[in-house]
Image (cartoon, grey):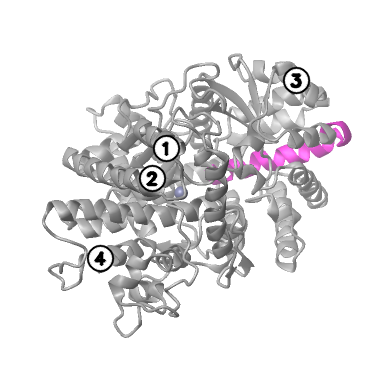
Amino acid sequence: MMDRDLNPCSDFFQYSCSKWLKANPIPSDQPGWGTFNSLALWNIAAVRETLEQAAAGSANRTDVEKQVGDYYAACADEAAVNRAGFAPLLPMLDRIGKLKDKSQLPELIAYMHQRIRPANLNFIDAQYQGVLFGIYAAPDFDDARVTLATLDQSGMNLPAREFYLKDDEKSKQIRDQYVKHVARMLALSGESQAKAAADANVVLSIESALAQAAMDIVLRRDPKNQNNRMTLAEVQALTPAFNWKNYFAAMQAPDSPQYIVAAPDFFRGVQKLIATEPIEHWQAYLRYSALHAAAPFLSAPFVQENFDFYGRILSGTPAIQPRARRCSYSTDIDLGEAVGQAYVARYFPPENKTRMLEMVKAIESALDVDIENAAWMSSPTKKLAHEKLAAQIDKIGYPNRWRDYSSVEIRRDDYLGNVQRASAFEIGRRMARFGKPTDRQDWNMTPPTVNAYEDAQSNTINFPAGILQPPFFEAAQIDAVNFGAIGAVIGHEIIHGYDDQGRKFDAQGNLRDWWTPDDAANYDQRDGCITDEYTQDVPEAGVKQNGKLSAGEDTADNGGIHIALGGLQRHLTAQGRDLDSLTKDGLTELQTFFLSYAHVWCGQQRPEAARTAVMSQGHSLGRYRINNVIANMPEFAHAFGCKAGQPMVHANACRVW
Ligand SMILES: [Zn+2]
């Protein structure tokens, strides 16, 4: 994979990825392509194989096989879905059409929340997509043992708040295209061209007002800004025009001892909107929101129009993915822990879990040593940092107990209905946790997912079986390969517990300042180096990266590879080897480790997708996840003989962990 004609000290991304990039152009149905994606494609092909067998409907199917098979079959029957047009959505559109008075909004919003697929939540950065606002269950910031109802900003159908507020030409152009798209969707659902065009402007105007009221993406990263506990009466006082008792009754939600309002100003904005916008405007906004959420499950014109804007315009992707693949993903999203059982049985043998746990333990030990050796940290803070690490739960592969979907009615001829009923099940499952003890064993990624996460409030790190495959993890590979790839991912997730967000939570997952003021100031100073480094031009995205937005991810990348290397060293020492020992390939262990690390981040994105990613989420693009990180590491300079002054050797090398 190396291009030996290039100099690793000039651009390690090019040195280690250019051959891969040439051999792996972005497929026409993808917004970008990297090693993550090729593994995801492999996983979803495996899922599809299972689903097609289950859908074939042999007499001895288990209940779980019947359920996932019927779900898949309903989606795969494109002719039937096309014949149905948008009829499956008519009950929801009718209810929106019958809205007579704004006092009925709470019941209508509840009806929609119960039928629209909720976003997968991944801690507090997640932009929760819900109509008008988001509702979910999350641990109490002050006492993580209890889960509370959380109300959050949402309701914007563009990818992020910034899309409504930025004033550059590209942003204006996207908004123009958005309004045209909204109009076409409304026209497809039977509105006249003139009404659809007028309504589309209303939709943009309401969503822009929501964006204005919403909390800034960087402010959201500080958990104390989201920690606003209220009684239901206080929530009611915030939005007098929206009757919360009626909403929660319609949601059939249990009482929550307190309510977290993640963004109070957003709800003040909602109050103002309800008070001022006429009923017809609400109907336009809700109608588009319903169409947008349902489009992928309706007939071809809706699927195409939805893809045309969100796929082609926002991500630059020319073609939509094959239907069988979309159906496989859809089944995984709605019935993931049912689909995941077969995946795990076939592709994640118990010995892989054992080997993963050994690596996790070695990397945790490396962080323990790091904490102990940190000259910038005092002993009281070190003691609590050790305690936090010791209290962390490491979840590998799949849940201890599979989620039971048996109450979800799945029909072989009702794709949208299946999605709606599965969504209602998921929303109900989340609401059932209001006021209940927090379940640290719950997962919010499905087993075939190629990803991983840390959750500070449950103090867990979570690695779905889907990422524990080559090139991330391979039982037959030497330690240097596995530690450079999945090891760096393990390290990344562990370090999230000690990044600028995670460090604010203690061993029990409570938002509590356990740092001495001096140690906190030292932390901020060290982290500031990373923030400055990543506040950089991203030419391939055409926008500037905000290092304050990506700080947590960048800190996790930089610290993660460091402790992964520490873990590798422990393993090598036990084998009587060291980092300079040569492997069978004639590379040193250390060179192998860095090449394996880079390989995981080889990839490229279409300019539109890169722009959306840099603006709306915290991860740096692959090129920077490689080059910015390794240039901070003297170990890298040692491995490849790089000298001061070369691009891959930062004069001001940042280091937190
Ligand atoms: Zn991360």
Residues at discs 1 and 4 in contact (Cβ within 8 Å): no
How packed is label 3: few (under 14 Cα within 10 Å), some, or many (20 or more)? few
The residue singled out by tag 3 in the image is: 234
In whole angstroms, how far apart are the C-alphas of marks 3 and 2?
42 Å
Visible residue check, residue 47: no
Looking at the rendered structure, which numbered label has been put on residue 590?
4
Q: Find residue 603 and report its horizontal and vertical position in percent.
A: 41, 66
Locate residue 352 relative to residue 7 in the image: left or right. left
Residue 310 occupies quadrant: bottom right
Looking at the rendered structure, which numbered label has been put on residue 371?
2
The residue singled out by tag 1 in the image is: 385
Within 8 Å of ligand 1, the CB of disc 1? no
Q: Find residue 116 and report its horizontal and vertical position in percent.
A: 58, 34
Q: Indicate the secondary structure of the residue bearing disc 2.
A: helix
In whole angstroms, how far apart are the C-alphas of marks 1 and 4?
28 Å
In whole angstroms, how far apart are the C-alphas of marks 2 and 1?
7 Å
* Residue stretch rendered in magenta on the structure: 274-297
Q: Is residue 282 magenta?
A: yes
Of the two numbered discs 3 and 4 on the same chain, state the one appearing first in sequence. 3
Of the two numbered discs 1 and 4 on the same chain, state the one appearing first in sequence. 1
Please, what is the three-letter code of the amino acid marked with disc 3? Glu
Residue at x-position 77% and y-position 27%: 98
